Amino acid sequence: MATLQAKSLDFPDELRPFVAKGEVAVVRLGEATIGRGVAEPGWRWSEHVKPLAGTDSCRERHTGYVISGRMHIVMDDGVEGEAGPGDAFVIPPGHDAWIVGSEPCVFLDFTGMESYAEGVVR
């Protein structure tokens, strides 16, 4: 039988710092893993997460919502786009991303956080 679950991302099950310039707070609710990421200006996946992932591009599928800030995404096939405040997004596996502007990007991710940025040591 399903049960109601609620957890605060202010008190996450796990806090995963990136190599630098940000972190993701993760809560687990049954089979769902939800993350709130904060990526500071200057953050780039290929610099601050790739060393951990060990892949040429991000292999996670992300489904989420941008609270603040702006992120530019480039797919392995060259397709580009941006997500900013109020945008819902789906980003398939095979991409790089970086922060645009001088504001941190704060986002919620509902599908790509199961093992994202695990084990990074500051």
Image (cartoon, grey):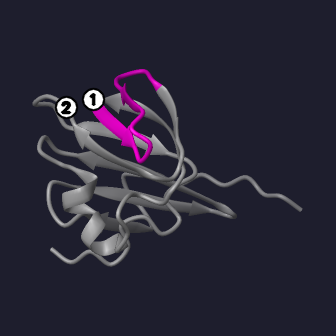
Amino acid beneath label 1: Arg
- What residue do we see at 27% from left, 47% from top? 38
Quarter of the image with the N terminus is bottom right
Q: Where is residue 15 in the image (x, y as percent from the top left)?
A: 33, 66
Question: Does 7 appear in magenta?
Answer: no
- Quick check: 92 left or right of 43? right
Res 28 quadrant in image: bottom right
Q: In this view, does 82 lie above or below 8?
A: above
Residue labelled with disc 2: 100
Residue bounds of the magenta highlight: 71-87
Question: Does 78 appear in magenta?
Answer: yes
Res 81 quadrant in image: top left
- What residue do we see at 34% from left, 24% from top? 84
- Quick check: 46 left or right of 115? left
Res 21 quadrant in image: bottom left
Q: Where is residue 102 in the image (x, y as percent from the top left)?
A: 10, 30
Residue labelled with disc 1: 70
Please give the count of numbered marks on the rendered protein: 2
Marks 2 and 1: in contact by CB < 8 Å?
yes
Q: How crowded is mark 1: few (under 14 residues within 10 Å), some or many (20 or more)?
A: many
Secondary structure state at the residue bearing disc 2: loop
Q: Where is residue 101 in the image (x, y as percent from the top left)?
A: 14, 28
Secondary structure state at the residue bearing disc 1: loop
Amino acid beneath label 2: Val
- What residue do we see at 45% from left, 23% from top? 87
Q: How far apart are marks 1 and 2 (CA)?
A: 5 Å
Residue furthest to the front: 77
- Closest to the observer, 58 or 122: 58
Quarter of the image with the C terminus is bottom left
- Closest to the observer, 26 or 40: 40
- What residue do we see at 34% from left, 49% from top? 37
